[in-house]
Image: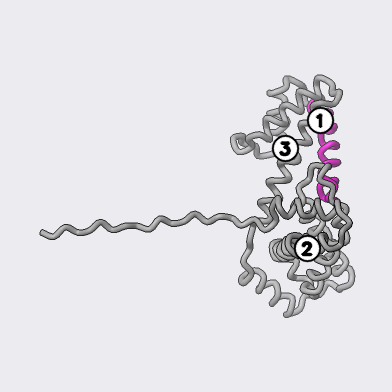
Amino acid sequence: MEQKKPVRRRRRRKRTTRHYFTKDHENAIIRYNQITDNVERTELYVKWIQPAFNEMVDKIVFTYKFTNLPNCDELRDECKIWLTTVLDKYDPAKGSKAFSYFSVITKNWFIHKVKKNQKQLKREIDISDISREAENKFLVVYNDYHEKRENVEFWQHLWGEIDTWSTDNMKENERKVLEAVKILLSDPNQIEIFNKKAIYLYIREITGLNTKQVVNNLNKLRRKYFAFKSDWNEGNL
């Protein structure tokens, strides 16, 4: 009886995410800001900086649905040109990655354009708006890579910021609350929290403080967080 040959199954290759804005692109921006030679600056811009900016702007536009802007293509080109004017504002000494810095200020730039456009237009819904909304909903492929990467870098910076808080001259109760917050943030999926009151109860159990003490010290930490978030949104980190 003839034996059947074993069927060889092809192994599926794992899809790898292509990072269009890498450390090499960041180094090119740093180098661009350090030199004055126009020939080398042009080479850096054409080879590294411009391609990264072009793809970053396009991805942000489609990810956050800025395609709804009536002059979207013109705005994309305008934004790419504008980014060259703020290249020198990037300071790696502040600890921010170039990707995070320029993606945040690009997103804020488009948000400003959206608000400006809304002020100019009357609140009317016509068939063209409905068609555009339907097109974006059903035909545009949503790519969450940009959003995920920005979220990862945000949390990395936030943890770095939180670590600096503990080095300040903190009072004992404030330090206890900070440590409790770090415990909650370190593994939030393991904690069943359904409302704000439950969070206070968790912190009370961890710290041994009463509600008033927890609230007062949380407010101090909240002010520090809001300052950090403001700097992040402005691209100052």
- Residue at 64% in and 57% down: 144
Q: Which residue is mark 3?
A: 196
In the image, what residue type sits under mark 2?
Answer: Glu
Residue 43: assigned label: 2
As rendered, which of 61 and 181 lies closer to the eye? 61
Q: Is residue 115 above or below residue 224?
A: below
Horizontal relation, residue 179 to residue 217: left or right: left
Q: Quadrant of residue 87?
A: bottom right
User: Label 1 crowding class (10 Å Cα cut-off): few <14, some 14-19, many 20+?
Assistant: some
Residue 234: assigned label: none
In the image, what residue type sits under mark 3?
Answer: Lys
- Point out the tag, 2 or 3, that comes first from the N-terminus: 2
As rendered, which of 118 and 82 lies closer to the eye? 82
Instruction: Name the dominant secondary structure of the magenta segment.
Output: helix
Horizontal relation, residue 42 to residue 194: left or right: right
Residue 165: assigned label: 1
Q: Secondary structure at mark 3?
A: helix
Q: Which residues are magenta?
A: 214-237
In the image, what residue type sits under mark 1?
Answer: Trp
Query: Disc 3 and disc 1: Cα gap in Å?
Result: 23 Å
Q: Is residue 101 above or below residue 61?
A: above
